[in-house]
Image (spheres, coloured by chain):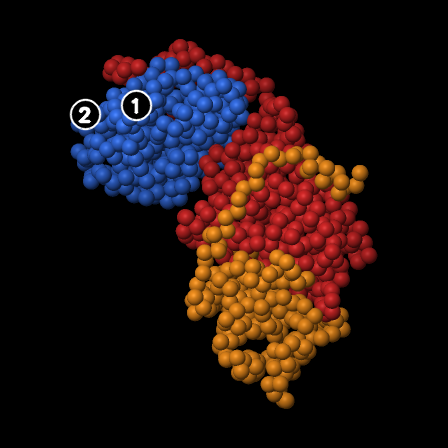
Chain colours: A red, B blue, C orange
Amino acid sequence: MSGNLEIDFLASSTRALGDAQLRRNFRRAMDGLMAKHAAVFPDPAEWTRLRALGAAIRAKNLLKLPELLEQLEKNLTSNGITVHWARTTAEANQVVLRLLEAHGIESLESDLGEYIIQLDGEMPSHIIMPAIHKNKDQIARLFSQKIKNAKYTEEVDELTAMARAVLRRKFFEAQAGLSGVNFAVAETGTLCLVENEGNGRMSTHVPPLHIALMGLEKVVERLEEVPPLYSLLTRSATGQAISTYFNLISGPRSGGEQDGPREVHLVILDNGRSRIYQDPELRVTLACIRCGACMNHCPVYTRIGGHAYEAVYPGPIGSILTPQVEGVGLRHELPHASSLCGACAEVCPVQIPITHLLIRLRRESGHKLPGSTVLGAGEARSGLEALAWSVWGWVLGHPRVYRLSTWFATRFWRLLPAGAPVLKAWTRSRHKPRAARRSLQEMARSKGVPHV
Amino acid sequence: MKCTMGHPGGSPLREVYFYATCLVDLFFPEAGMAGIELLQSAGLRVIFPEGQTCCGQPAFNCGYWEQARAVARGQLALFPKDIPVILPSGSCAGMMKVHFPELFHGQPEAAQARALAGRVFELTQFLVDQLDLKLEDLGQPVKVTLHASCHAQRDQGVLDQPKALLRQLRNVELVPLARERECCGFGGVFAVREPGLSEAMAADKAEDACATGAELVLSTDGGCLMNIGGTLERRGFGPATMHIAQFLWERTHVR
Amino acid sequence: MSEREAILAGLRAARPQEAPPALDFSVLEEKRWDPQERVARLRRAMSAVKTEFIEAGPGDWPKAVVDCVLRENLPNLLFGPHTTEGRALAAAWPDRGPRLAPYDQPVETFKQELFEDIAAGFTTTLGGIAETGGLLLAPGPFEPRLLSLVPPVHLALLRADRIFDTLFQAFRELGWNRQLPANALVISGPSKTADIEQTLAYGVHGPKRLIVVLVS
């Protein structure tokens, strides 16, 4: 995870590519999600308009981010919700731990997918479906091993019922509930939570203490801006027009209520976001509403899954967010792990130009551009690669030199060994490319095609 | 010949530029020649400027913009007349049309890049949308499938045009390719920088191509062709590959 | 400098120059259906995710609720006694048989019973959403939050003439942008998950069954 000096994307992705079970699980899951996505946005005109509205709302709100955060804090506070600010994840953890001190610190995941992976000591592999890399028999085995008195079953309904029973007890006993926030409304001082299972409401309304954590970019100015974003979120994430539950929390137990938490706290987390905010081109990274559609449609993510990215945020959004948060030198492999096919940008509900930003971050990782505020800019510069591109640029910038080299290539390509550097990465799975006997330029000239 | 492009004053189109692209120039020259001849058969005078090298996309994609500009600057200067520039490649057309303005933003060549972008076309897009080219099939029955590159599809919106041209050929059966919008794994430098990822994607694309039962896989892009073709050839069985320009020319003209 | 000041100062330093984009909500505003269509859309969308519907008239819905409880062999029904609807339900409740339990004490006084013994909860709603299906609720002192969450069965009263075209429209008409209750929510069906091999399973943590008493 972040701070890990042993991050090696080549190793982790190679491992994932070789895992046939993982490949099968993800292929099936992503194909299903892509089909659902297509089905829930059947009208291209409506998709275009809704998406444009979503992008505009996020852009507008990002432009006024500091004011909106202040307005949010003011309205949350007058609603009885205590607001904390944390520049780093360490600081955020400190805030949470201090609040939990009086109540005991054992923490348990309540979402079924998160619960499954917590039982197995794993991290999530997808931001919406954290256990997507597991199939039924893996889950069945896990439950029968880790849950007291559980029998082995692969029936989904029975597995679900087992988890319901275990977690129901925990909801009953819990002294505190932690949640994220999908949207925070500045106008009304409200935290919005989107969920299907009911664990969100269980965690935030049953225990006496509710602590919510939120990246500072999640604030939305007005309540009326929430429905379009919410619609884009549920459709993009799981192909649902609406989630089972949509919770709007504007205060703790108050004014004669019989239940609800006594205390509600919000921790506003920066963790590199205010730095991303400085750059007008990269700022749009913060528009993300965490739907996961980009990873569902990514041909790379489909083949390696989320763990291979070794980051909280994997896939395309992870490949632009993680380097900016952790350093583009440390994480230089992520922006390069893409063929730039553009499937992600095509489905992003808030029109983040992901491929454009991948190229920008590739540039930042290898160069110290004047005025750049990107963390770790230039740290992954390879002198060898820079030299190679300079030679490339010189040859292709001089047409006569280029023509000479293509002449050589057409006449002598056979002499180039398949195991030559760079070429061998190609030929390990493909036939060596064959240069033609004559280039098109020669052919066109000999056929009398005019050049002016 | 219907043509929606014209000069101010409404005179009909008579000339176009043809830009080879480095991959077609070196690896698929017959396809490039076929593209030129298809345009000539529509009555156009095709100009093949000297000094063509590369659109600069590899360096652009890798973030080496100074080097990309050094190359692209020279290429910008090859098209002085205000006439269309046709490329037998979706990705290179995308580079000139969409990315040249980005690359030269804030540079002295900015206006020139924007002006060029307005008249760049991928070949099949031009043949269908601008020329409404009519084709007559002279060949024997054949089953083919089509892989349109990601850049063709997403930067240019090109998928229907190659299909429309193929559907005009009555002895050609176009079999749909499963997951046709999914990348084949070429991605330019990606293929050699991330070979594991690239070959996993290429293997699946090759598998999907074989599953169609087609004898031939066609593409608008040389990079995709090399990738899919090279993968299939290493396997030793499966369809052959061909650039769509070459296919269209060979089907509609006796050699 | 506090964390807060440091973060805000950092954000303010950016001084973005771009003009804010205009927001065009017409794609949502133009979704309008006539009253029958609204009911039909809501029913279709919610039934597709296993919501059950009982039809009743404005005078006989309490009896429909009682009949449902008897039919389903539910031993009890938790409700908020201090609402108009609560009083109407209590008035129609049979003397013998299932228990009509009031939720008018703090949850701490009967938490174990709530989690282990209560079979069903009854709530009113503020309305529904036609476009996607969904019920709008505003829990408060008279109908507590857990009433629609903890009991395995949730019976919800929905008036057919209070169905809004979209969530967007509902927010506007309810005036929630000016005054939101401490807790408001939308419920579109019984609880569900697709976390195990993307296979839908119902009844995870929230209610296993949602029964809508549709009054028209």
Q: Quick one: SS at disc 1?
A: strand
Instruction: Tell me which chain the residue with mark 1 is part of.
Output: B
Residue positioned 60% across, 66% down in the render? C137
Where is the N terminus of chain A found, in terms of image quarters? top right
Percent position (x, y) of residue A169? 69, 65
Mark drawn on residue B16: 1
Q: As drawn, is B26 to the left or to the right of C24?
A: left
Q: Quick one: SS at disc 2?
A: loop
Position above or below: A273 against A385: below
Q: Amino acid at mark 2?
A: Arg
> In this orientation, which residue lies closer to the viewer: A195 or A116?
A195
Label 1 vs 2, first from the N-terminus: 1
Where is the C terminus of chain A found, in terms of image quarters? top left
Badge 1 and badge 2 in a common chain: yes
> In this orientation, which residue lies closer to the viewer: A232 or B8?
B8
- Mark-to-mark CA distance, 1 and 2: 24 Å
Q: As drawn, is B198 to the left or to the right of B30?
A: right
Percent position (x, y) of residue A44? 41, 48
Which image quadrant is residue A277 in? Answer: top right
Percent position (x, y) of residue A333? 58, 32
> In this orientation, which residue lies closer to the viewer: A267 or A112?
A267
Mark 2, residue position: B255
Instruction: Tell me which chain the residue with mark 2 is part of.
Output: B
Position above or below: A425 against B168: above
Q: Amino acid at mark 1?
A: Val
Q: As drawn, is A365 to the left or to the right of B182?
A: right
Q: Neighbour class for label 2 at 10 Å: few (<14), some, many (≥20)?
A: few
Which image quadrant is residue B118 in? Answer: top left
